[in-house]
Image: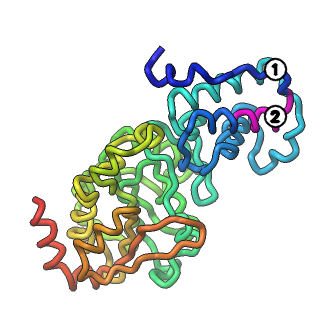
Amino acid sequence: MNKVAALYTGLNYQHDGLESVIDFVRWGAALFSQANLVFGHGTDNAFDEALILTCHKLMIPTDRVDHYLSARLTHTERHELTELYRQRIETRQPAAYLTGQARFAGLDFYVNEHTLVPRSPIAELIEKGFHGWVVASEVEQVLDLCTGSGCIGIASLQAFDNAQVDLVDISAKALEVAQKNIARYALEGQVRTIESDLFAALEGKKYDLILSNPPYVDAIEMAALPPEYQAEPALGLAAGVDGLDLVRRILAHAADHLTDKGVLVVEVGVSQYFVEQVYEELPLYWFDFEHGGEGVFAISREELILFDDILQARLAEVD
């Protein structure tokens, strides 16, 4: 038995008397609470986490689960659900890794341990078509930089259905996941993957919109991450002492890959504080979100060019 599993040997996995779907969801939620699990990868509480896992194992559509809550489980189903709950507790993997599925911007995506679990507030901007920043009908080329599963770039087609989308990541394993999501939505002629260290392999191509959810977790926060977040690839999270290692490079080079009216949108999450300190001169626009989330800014190509001296200086300071 590994050290993590040993911590939970005191939990009672006996399910005598539990028969229905809702019985097991409530029980799973109680187990998760007792085990002090951490949520934030698609759910924010123990009940919803148990519900997602239960629906996955029983193949119940989550949008119709109300019709099944009183259904009685077979002996095999009760056993398999118990084992899935046990796996969630003892491995501390996010539910999305156990199901291989995550929902983002109204779409379902395949995910695994080589990609972050989709949860970016950029989904809300996609829903609103990036209103005020681009004219949807004029967006022909979109770049999803540090794409991971490809969720942001693929979902952006809901706002720009005629655009061509490039999904870029330094991780070949992540791009394999993104390629599966391209195939899932039959987008092979519209979306492609490119293995690249940020802009390095793009050969000067320009985009009307660059979207990026790069690694932005600073060193102190990385050291304090709970196990569920440590289960995600560090390559997609860690970004140096202040969390800005990649953001500095993106800001310094994005203008070279934007069309004249192009716009850069970047998520930096809790590292917003450091961005505002390091780039206090920049006219960054910080979005407010109705459905939760923080730390996403936009800046136009014109503004990037205007402040290019500062951007290059800030990059040089850490090179």
| Residue 26 is a magenta residue | yes
Q: Which mark is residue 23?
A: 2
Colour scheme employed for the rendering of this structure = rainbow
Name the amino acid, label 2. Asp
- The residue depicted at 27 percent of the width and 63 percent of the height is 247
Residue 136: image location, x then y, percent: 52, 78
| Residue 239 is a magenta residue | no
Q: Tell which of 141 and 292 is nearer to you.
A: 292
Q: Earlier in the sequence, mark 1 or mark 2?
A: 1
Identify the magenta region. 19-28
Residue 199 appearing in the image: no
Q: Which residue is mark 1?
A: 16
Residue 181: image location, x then y, percent: 52, 46
Classify mark 1: residues with Cα within 10 Å, few (<14), some (14-19) or many (20+).
few
Residue 298: image location, x then y, percent: 38, 76
Q: Secondary structure at mark 1?
A: loop
Work out which residue is located at the far top of the displayed protein and give it.
1
Residue 60 appearing in the image: yes
Q: Is residue 79 left or right of residue 3?
A: right
Q: Secondary structure at mark 2?
A: helix
Q: Main secondary structure of the magenta part?
A: helix
Name the amino acid, label 1. Asp
Q: Tell which of 117 and 40 is nearer to you.
A: 40
